[in-house]
């Protein structure tokens, strides 16, 4: 494991590539998106794995939604981990609040509170795990899923 600027950690073990970081302020939501974008750009450039433009944008959106919720509803820092394994990236956010999130039914007339709805819609999976302290929320995004074959690094 190697520490990079800003306290982020990167690791490569076999076919598993990961990065993690802690975030404490609302301004860190943009930093978390940047970590995701930089990580996936490196996954493509350094490790030669295809990352579609859709995957690049979706991962940044998911990171933004999960880190925003953690910062809004839990005291203290949250931890973001991105792990690439088997053609997908697992996005996991830990926070200190043990209460599972309220997952509301879709309602186009509701203003706000659509973050988890979005995450559940775009991910291959969705899981909430209680921890001895807090909880982890995880989802997986396929890296190369554009029907048109676009594997460039577009941003949102």
Image (spheres, rainbow, N blue to C red):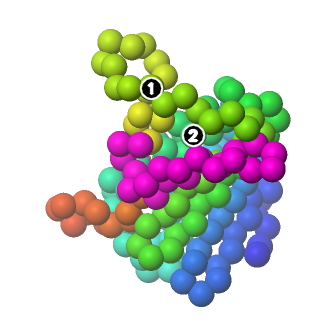
Write the start and end of the magenta stretch as one range: 120-140
The stretch drawn in magenta includes residue 127: yes
Left or right: where 52 falls relative to 13: left
Image position, residue 13 (x, y; %): 64, 83
Q: Mark 2: which secondary structure?
A: helix
Between the residue at mark 1 and the residue at mark 2, the CA separation in whole angstroms equals 15 Å
Q: For mark 1, what is the residue?
A: 104
Does residue 79 lie above or below 42 as drawn?
above
Residue 34 appears in view: no
Instruction: Name the mark nearer the viewer: 1 or 2.
Output: 1
Image position, residue 63 (x, y; %): 54, 45
The answer to which quarter of the image holds residue 14 is: bottom right
Q: Nearer the viewer, residue 124 or 14?
A: 124
- Residue at 53% of width from left, 50% of height from top? 127
Image position, residue 74 (x, y; %): 74, 31
Q: For mark 2, what is the residue?
A: 66
Going from N to C along the chain, the mark reached first, 1 or 2, is 2
Image position, residue 79 (x, y; %): 72, 49
Q: Mark 1: which secondary structure?
A: loop
Does residue 107 lie above or below 117 as drawn?
above
């Amino acid at each position: 494991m190697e520490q990079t600027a800003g306290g982020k950690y990167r690791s490569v073990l076999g076919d598993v590539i990961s990065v993690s970081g802690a975030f404490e302020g609302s301004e860190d939501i943009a930093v978390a998106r940047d970590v995701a974008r930089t990580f996936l750009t490196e996954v493509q450039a350094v490790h030669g794995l295809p990352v579609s433009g859709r995957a690049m944008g979706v991962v940044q959106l998911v990171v933004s939604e999960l880190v925003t919720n953690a910062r809004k509803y839990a005291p203290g820092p949250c931890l973001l981990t991105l792990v690439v394994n088997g053609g997908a990236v697992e996005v996991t956010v830990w926070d200190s609040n043990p209460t599972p999130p309220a997952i509301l039914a879709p309602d186009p007339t509701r203003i706000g509170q659509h973050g988890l709805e979005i995450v559940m819609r775009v991910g291959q999976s969705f899981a909430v795990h209680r921890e001895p302290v807090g909880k982890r929320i995880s989802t997986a995004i396929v890296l190369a899923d554009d029907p048109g074959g676009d594997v460039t690094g577009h941003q949102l």
